[in-house]
Amino acid sequence: MKTRLIIFYITLLLPIFNFAQLKNPDCKNIKTGNFYFYPPTSSKGFLIIRDKATQKEINLQTGDTSFWKIRWQSPCAFTLSFLRKSRRVSNEELSFFNSHKVAVEIFRVTKDYYIFKGRLDNMATSNVTDTVWFTKRGL
């Protein structure tokens, strides 16, 4: 009887514990550092260099770099505002970048990567969910 009761509690509590881990990731190690992003619909890779106030995104193939201002909304959520690019941008591109912010929410952190949801304009648009890695992979 005790064994059944223990199994029942484990079965009941384990999903709750796992859900709590997903809702409250430890994001302190992702506020600064070097990270790697590989969009699934592209052969491109990006190096993200982040400090607490800015983020630099470098295209690993071309070296093209964009610079963003970070505003942390909570320990695991921030917005990015465009600052500049290393190459000249068209007036249309500049207008688009300057009129939108990117909102990012990290919802899982592991020893190898973190998973985020990103949207334009403070989560008002559709989500993109993807992975950012802590180490570089071969392209």
Image (cartoon, grey):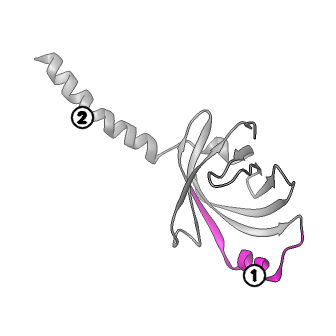
Whether pointer 1 and pointer 2 mark residues with C-beta atoms closer than 8 Å, the reply is: no
What residue appears at the point 80 percent right and 69 percent down from the top-left corner? Answer: 83
The residue depicted at 24 percent of the width and 34 percent of the height is 12
Q: Secondary structure at mark 1?
A: helix
Q: Position of residue 113 (x, y in %)?
A: 61, 39
Q: Which residues are magenta?
A: 87-105
Helix, strand or loop status at disc 2: helix
Residues 10 and 35: in front is 35
- Report which quarter residue 77 is drawn in: bottom right
Q: Position of residue 109 (x, y in %)?
A: 56, 41
Q: Nearer the viewer, residue 67 or 88?
A: 88
Q: CA distance from mark 1 to mark 2?
A: 52 Å
Q: Residue at x 64, y 66 (%)?
A: 102
Q: Is residue 135 left or right of residue 5?
A: right
Judged left or right of residue 94, residue 133 is left
Q: Which residue is mark 2?
A: 12
Q: Residues within 10 Å of mark 1 (few under 14, many from 20)?
A: few
The disc label shown at residue 95, or none = 1
Mark before the other along the chain sequence, 1 or 2: 2
- x then y, percent, for residue 54: 77, 58
The mark found on residue 23 in the picture is none
Of the pair 68 and 135, the residue shown nearer to us: 135
Relative to 107, does residue 99 appear above or below in the rendering?
below
The quadrant of the picture occupied by the N terminus is top left
Q: Amino acid at mark 2?
A: Leu
User: Magenta stretch: residue 134 in it?
Assistant: no
Q: Nearer the viewer, mark 1 or mark 2?
A: 1
